[in-house]
Image: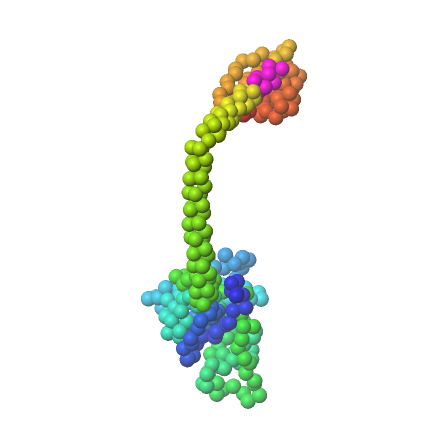
Amino acid sequence: MNLTGSNKELLLVHRGMNPVSLDHSVNVMLTPQFYTMKKETLPVKYLYQAKKIAPSLFDGLLDESRTYEYFVFKEKDGWVFIAYDPEEIRELLLAKGIFAEHLSKVFFAQQTAKLFEQPVLLGDKEALMTIDGIVTLIPKGILSGDLHATEFSARFTPSSGVALQGVYTSLLSKKEAIVLAGIFTVFAGIFFVEGWQYSRSLKVQQQEMQELLEGYPALQSKLQRESIAFKYRTIDSKERKKRETIKTLAAMIFKGVTLTSYHMNEKHFKVVFSCANDKVAKKVQELAKKSHFNVTRAKGSNIVVIEGNV
């Protein structure tokens, strides 16, 4: 099962092609019938800069009643600008049997101009061939007899392309989606049965426990005692931790240290010490850090703030 979309079939789409019937995802390459191309040598270094100026290069060249998008790529020392109408392309692909769920990426023939130096035949009357660096649609009849046509294949796939907006490209083919749906349905059935069995088992266990407690009241009393004991053990543990924290903080009050603020609740404590000098403040800091408390001391200040959880 190919879920990555790599090594997809590449279709060369032109107006004269016959409709296709697909059950898998494909990439398509468009002939110059579906785009307008310009080559320019411009003093720009980055792709995003070239994309910004693309619309201005086609002023007066495009049908103003249509909406165009632009694809730009670097070619040797210049830039190649391609203007295309996404709606026109969508309509063409639908007419040729290439539906949205089967469409992955769209490429342009000019992107692989080098490979079209040998002509690629488009039916009985036309061919696609690179002339003076531009991929051009030509009549088949003008090809010289010693010029051999090359076969179009996935090796023509460029490294980058466009995804038509509004086209949903599925990672799964229809067949794969049906198979996975069946698998998930089976799992859902298994989980439902196991959940139902677990629910029944839990009810039986609860009933057995209730009968056991009714038959042996002493056992019920024991469980209650253990529950109460656990509750008070938890409370006692918290109180012990508070006492230990207070004891640790008290040990930090020595000559040169004054407790100026103290606050403690069920979860947190905060203490502020005023120290006589820098040496005393550093000593308090060391003791607090050793006890894994949070210590704050402003630069140049002898006020030490200690916080922590209890």
The residue nearer to you, when weighing 267 against 280, is 267
Quarter-of-image position of residue 211: top left
Q: Is residue 258 left or right of residue 25?
A: right
Quarter-of-image position of residue 23: bottom left
Quarter-of-image position of residue 83: bottom left
Q: How is the image coloured?
A: rainbow
Q: Which residues are magenta?
A: 243-251
Residue 243 at what x, y percent from top left? Answer: 56, 18
Decide: is 219 above or below 246: below
Residue 84 at what x, y percent from top left? Answer: 42, 67
Residue 163 in sight here: no
Secondary structure predominantly adopted by residues drawn in magenta: helix
Decide: is 257 above or below 147: above
Q: Is residue 294 left or right of residue 188?
A: right
Residue 219 at what x, y percent from top left? Answer: 48, 30
Magenta stretch: residue 113 in it? no
Magenta stretch: residue 249 in it? yes
Most extreme residue toward the bottom, as rendered? 145
The number of callouts visible is 0
Decide: is 207 above or below 142: above
Most extreme residue toward the left, as rendered? 65
Residue 239 in sight here: yes
Most extreme residue toward the front, as rendered? 215
Residue located 43% across and 67% down the image: 174
Residue located 40% across and 74% down the image: 97
The residue nearer to you, when weighing 21 against 176, is 176
Residue 207 at what x, y percent from top left? Answer: 42, 39
The residue nearer to you, when weighing 199 against 217, is 217
Residue located 45% across and 68% down the image: 175
Most extreme residue toward the top, as rendered? 255
Q: Quadrant of the C terminus?
A: top right
